[in-house]
Image (cartoon, grey):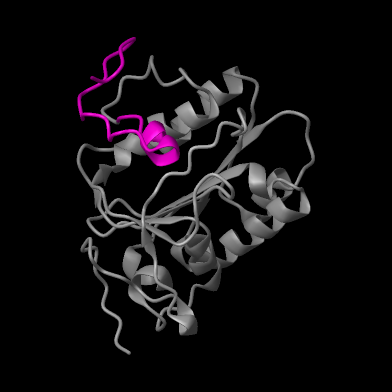
Amino acid sequence: MSHVLTTAPDALVPFGTNAAIEQRFTAMADPHRPRTPRLLVVAADLSAAQIGAYAGEAVDTPHLDRLAKSGARFTQLATSPAPPPMSLLLAPLAEGGYDTGRFADVDRAVSFVGLRRKVPWAAYVELGAADCDAGVGALMAALRRGDHYRMTVVLVLGAHTPNAPALLAWPGQIPPRQRFDTPIARADWLPTLLEVCRPGSSRHLDHEGVDLSGHLLDGDEVPARARRTVGARAA
C-alpha cells in the first residue's frame, strides 16, 4: 500500500497495519464536562511529513500516532494570520488558579505533569523534532500514572509551515479517530484553549485568533473570522 502525504479534505490516511480509517470530525457535547481541565501543549519543530499519522507507515512515530487515534488530526492549518506565542496561555491560567510551567526538557515536564495536585495545571513543552515522539510517549505515560489522563486536554502543534501538523485529544470529550478538515488558523489555538480552561480569559487579548471551543466541543457553527480587539469578542 502506498502512502502519500496530503492535507486534502478527502484524504483517508491509514494508521499502522490495521489501516484504521478516520471519521470526519463530530463534536461530543457533554453536560458534565470538567470545568477546569488540565492542559498539556507540546510545540515541536516538525512537519506533517515527520508524523506517521499524516505520512503513513514508513514514518515511525508510534506515540504521536496513538495520540492521533485517540482524538482529532487537523489537516488544514493556515499560516496566516501569524499566531501569537502559545506561551501566552500560561499567564491568564495562572491568574485563574492554575499551576503552570514552561519546559524545554522532557524529564522536568514529565515530573510536572505527573504530580498529584488539588489545583488544575497547564504545561507548555517545547521539543525538538527528533525528541517529539518519545517525549509525547513519556508525557502521556506520566498523565496515566498521575490519574490525569481523562482530565487533560492535549495539543501537539508542529512548525509554522504550510503543512503544519496538529493533534488534539481529550478522552471522553473529543471522540477518537477523527479528521478535522475545516480550515483554521494557528492563531485560533490560543483563544480556544484559554476558553476551554478558563472561560472569558481570552477577551482582553489583542490577537487575531477566534475561539473554536464551542465548535470543537459542542458542535456550534465555526465563528466568523474577525480581528479581536482589546476588551471585545470576535463577531
User: Does the magenta-highlighted stretch encompass residue 213?
Assistant: yes
Give the position of the N terminus as an image quadrant: bottom left
User: Residue at left 33%, top 36%?
Assistant: 188
Q: Quadrant of residue 95?
A: top right
Q: Can residue 101 be seen at all in this image of the molecule?
A: no
Q: Give the vertical position of 99 relative to 174 (above or below).
A: above
Q: Give the vertical position of 130 relative to 182 (above or below).
A: below
Pinpoint residue 129: horizontal percent, then vertical percent: 44, 64
Towards the viewer: 218 or 67:
218
Towards the viewer: 131 or 234:
234
User: Residue at left 54%, top 44%?
Assistant: 173
What is the magenta segment's predominant secondary structure? Answer: loop
Left or right of 94? Residue 76 is: left
Q: Can residue 34 be seen at all in this image of the molecule?
A: yes
Q: Which residues are magenta?
A: 210-235
Q: Give the vertical position of 64 relative to 114 (above or below).
A: below
Pinpoint residue 88: horizontal percent, then vertical percent: 45, 30
User: Residue at left 40%, top 32%?
Assistant: 214
Left or right of 151? Residue 133 is: left
Pinpoint residue 59: horizontal percent, then vertical percent: 42, 78
Left or right of 145? Residue 159 is: left
Q: Quadrant of residue 12?
A: bottom left
User: Does the magenta-highlighted stretch encompass residue 121?
Assistant: no
